[in-house]
Amino acid sequence: MANNCRSQAQGILLGLACGDALGRSVEFQRPDRIKRRHGRVTEMLANGTHGQPAGTITDDTEMALCIARSLAEHGAFEPEDIATRFVDWKRSGPFDIGIMTSSALQRIQNGESWDEAGQREWEASMEGSNAGNGSLMRCAPYAIAYRNEPTELVEVSRQSSAITHADPRCQWSCALFNRTLANLLTDVDQPLERVLNEIGSELPGDVRNAVEPVTDARRGEPVDISLENSGYVVTTLQAGLYHGLTAETAEDAIVDAVMMGGDTDTIGAVAGAVTGARFGEDALPERWVTEIDEVEELRQLATSLIERRQ
Ligand SMILES: [Mg+2]
């Protein structure tokens, strides 16, 4: 059981990194173009979008690393420390950073507090560009550390989102996603269905409506999960949960997510975390894992977060 939990926790962080790195080379491309050029994207590709070596992770995994390192060091959610780590990372000049993330972190850099910056950035943003997936993509480490504390997990997931993404759809997508991961880690049957039963009434309607078809798909009913994946948190959540919870293998979950096109690294990362929690790290293709430079640190951090509280 303990070994199993460790493998699943490592699966979350390594699955996230695998999906991020696999999707990176085809980010922003339409699915028909990806298919025409690559067939199925089953190998880590060099160059492509962002022109990086094969196996390069992006902001999704880098920001998740900021959170995981802070949790491992402090043993609890320290939002100010996490905001500082985000700002330091932004200052390092990453090749990929979301617009809302960049603007909110700039506010913190300019002296606004972590709990004001995201809120003000959100109030200054228009509908249509105010609910991106930039906090969902990085939030999985909380699910490991707070897997046995469901109320706290919702609270820290929402607050961590609000550092850069204060929209209720973003905050609640992180909460629902992490509660689903925590259920997978603790071997709860019907992990997503249970979350919907427990906090469904608190979710914004758009989030609930997007996730309910995933439960239909899990019962074997045909559903249409082919929305354009432009980076809207609700469609990313839907696609990530759908592939993560319904694919028969970890490889299929991540490849199918990336083949949807659009924001492929983040859809891949979200699906990867779910499938990693479901099947454990051994289920991730070895040829992908060995391409990722940060694998050892990700493994160690997953173990530290598991041991944080039993
Ligand atoms: Mg990215």
Image (tube, rainbow, N blue to C red):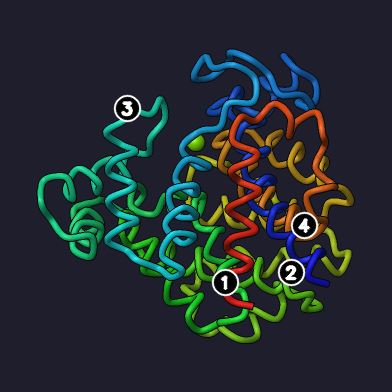
| x and y, in percent, of residue 54 in the image | 64, 19
What is the CA distance from the residue labelled 1 to the residue labelled 3? 36 Å
Circle 4: element type: helix
Residue 167 in view in this figure = yes
Q: In this view, does 223 lie to the left or right of 178?
A: right
* Amino acid type at mark 2: Leu
* Amino acid type at mark 4: Ser
What is the CA distance from the residue labelled 2 to the residue labelled 4? 12 Å
Q: Mark 2 points at which residue?
A: 184
| Between discs 4 and 3, the one toward the N terminus | 4
Mark nearer the viewer, 2 or 4: 4
Circle 2: element type: helix
| x and y, in percent, of residue 17 in the image | 62, 40
Closer to us: 79 or 127: 79
| Between discs 1 and 4, the one toward the N terminus | 4
Q: Reply above or below: 114 against 93.
A: below
What is the CA distance from the residue labelled 2 to the residue labelled 1? 19 Å
Circle 1: element type: helix
Q: Name the residue under label 3.
A: 93
Instruction: Name the residue: 51% across, 70% down.
Output: 175
Q: Quadrant of the N terminus?
A: bottom right
